[in-house]
Amino acid sequence: MRRYLIVGSGVAGVSAAQTLRRLDPAGEVTMVSYDPFGYYSRPGLAYYLTNEIGEKQLFPFQEKDWQALKIRRLRAWVSRLHPAEHRLELSDGASLVYDRLLLATGSQALPLGIPGADLEGVVKLDDLADARRILNLCKRARRAIVIGGAITALELVEGLRACRLQVTYLLRGSRYWSGVLDETEARLVERRLAEEGVHILPHTELAAFQGQRGRLTGAVTTTGQHIPCDLAAAAIGIAPRKELAAAAGLRTERGILVNDYLETSAPDIYAAGDVAQIVDPLTGEAALDTLWGPARRSGAAAAQNMAGEAARYLKQVPFNVTRLAGLPVTIIGRVGQGADQDVAGIVRGDSETWRQLPNAIIVEQSYEVNRLRLLVGERALVGAVVMGDQTLSRPIYELVRGGVDLSSCREALFSSPRPAEVIGEFWRSWRAQSET
Amino acid sequence: MKITHLWHAERKRREARAAGYVVPEPARCVQCGICSFYCPIEIDVRRHAWEGIPVHESYCLTCGECVARCPRGALSLERTSLYQREG
Ligand SMILES: Cc1cc2nc3c(=O)[nH]c(=O)nc-3n(C[C@H](O)[C@H](O)[C@H](O)COP(=O)(O)OP(=O)(O)OC[C@H]3O[C@@H](n4cnc5c(N)ncnc54)[C@H](O)[C@@H]3O)c2cc1C
């Protein structure tokens, strides 16, 4: 009987556990995680903050689902890994041995490296414990500031607004999420935030937090401006939790390096999800994704390999649907705008691929709240940002993923005042053709 | 809720009533649970989305609440075969 060990109870770990159970019904599967809440929807934390759902709804699995899965679940902190002995050490000194090990340790928020960041009232949003802390602080807080970029910072802004706090959103650069959104898209989001009463301060960088008796009372900017606040939320980027692997001598870079079978450099050890930095055999590049979908898929693929079924994990065109200031937004493939001063490295719900500058021409169409930006490469679509109406997001995803030759509609795309209709029409005829 | 959201929800509901069933697109789903929470008869729509199985339960009201509420556009209504020729 094979002993499988999974570190992490996030979506990568859970999807691995399900796959292992299916492929090896007799295998012994143990999942270790220090998170007291186990498995829940991390993206759902945003809707918990806005009070669209209660805490109970964050948990996709009920007790009966765990029983059906027949795995052992342990709550413990894994402190060391001994690859040669096929053994893990827990913080209480106990040991766990394995035949196959999956590291699905996820990622965590980068700390704000400024004085006062340890004051009560300075928060981040990594897990359910953080969300609870924020909601608790909101009961007596009145003025909040938010620092950072991308999706999580905006989720914090909206969550704090929903708690009726006065919110000031500080941007280091001139606009929101400049690494991915273009100027028009960013302004659209900013305008909607302003309508919701959020005060945006561009070109503002924090130097320090100030407090009294251990509690946050304000912040000071690099230009000496004082901003009073009793809550400060930061989302400046994240780092994969690779320490366990690195300390054990496994090859790591920004994450744990794995090949397309999700194998690390050590025998019988695999990595999946946010922590895995997967080498693309086509380009030789190793990129990070911090997305729910790829975490689930890579967890399942790692489990297939652990159970002895050789399964290559092919990265798909990254794709994320999210809500920015109430607008549904889908980001597909490469849409890069270059550098973003509000985030360091990679952020939540992100893919490094998005920021790679495509060698493409941009076709865009915007309405009052709907906007479509297509990035047209030499031959095919390489990326898109779909804001507002989502009708076209799936067709466009299919065209980007399939690298479909656009030659026949290229001219029309550039000359038409309505590229959305051109691409929609093209997709319909392409699909009709591929169905026959 | 903003007026545009209300309008959107109402439109989706009307579309739903035009008969059909709820089909999830698992790649868009992040298991947030909003769909299951708002289902008036407590169908676990989220589980369907995890497993990629359409909501075929005969007691589904096709009220469209889950489709309208999903913040990720992961749910849609597909017409049943009876209506297919019209589409
Ligand atoms: C607020 C928020 C919003 C998000 N929004 C989106 C979104 O819109 N779209 C999207 O696609 N993705 C989004 N994400 C990202 C998505 O949730 C992650 O990509 C996904 O959860 C990664 O899953 P994982 O299993 O790799 O890691 P995680 O879910 O982070 O799980 C890691 C697990 O490892 C455990 N662990 C780590 N180290 C140890 C140790 N030493 N000992 C024991 N246990 C350990 C942790 O307790 C945890 O259980 C969001 C994330 C957050 C936090």
Image (cartoon, coloured by chain):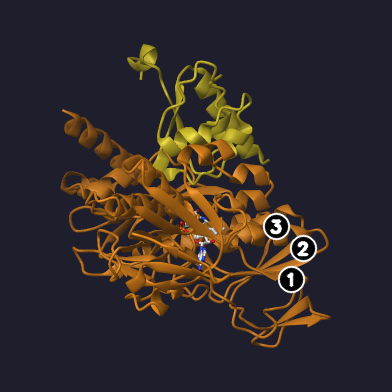
Chain colours: A orange, B yellow
Residue ID for mark 1:
A121
Q: Position of residue A272 (x, y in %)?
A: 37, 59
Label 3: how many Cα within 10 Å (few below 14, some 14–19, many 20+): some
In the shown orientation, is residue A158 left or right of residue A355? Answer: right
| The one of A75 and A85 positioned closer to us in this rendering | A85
Which image quadrant is residue B26 in?
top left
The chain that hosts pointer 3 is A
Q: Residue at image x 45%, y 36%?
A: B49
Counting residues from the N terminus, which is met first, the one under dot 2 or under dot 3?
3
Q: Are marks 2 and 1 in contact (CB under 8 Å)?
A: yes
Mark 2 element type: helix
Counting residues from the N terminus, which is met first, the one under dot 1 or under dot 3?
1
Label 2: how many Cα within 10 Å (few below 14, some 14–19, many 20+): some
Q: Where is residue A363 in the image (x, y as percent from the top left)?
A: 33, 54
Q: Position of residue A393 (x, y in %)?
A: 38, 44
In the shown orientation, is residue A297 left or right of residue A381? Answer: right
Mark 3 element type: helix
Marking on residue A83: none
Residue ID for mark 2:
A137
Mark 1 element type: loop
Gap in angstroms between the C-alphas marked 2 and 1:
7 Å
Q: Are marks 2 and 3 in contact (CB under 8 Å)?
A: no
Of the 4 image quadrants, the one containing the C terminus of chain A is: top left
The three-letter amino acid code for the residue at tag 3 is Arg
Q: Residue at image x 47%, y 25%?
A: B55
Residue ID for mark 3:
A132
Which image quadrant is residue A24 in?
top left
Q: Does the rendering let one see residue A290?
A: no
| The one of A276 and A375 positioned closer to us in this rendering | A276
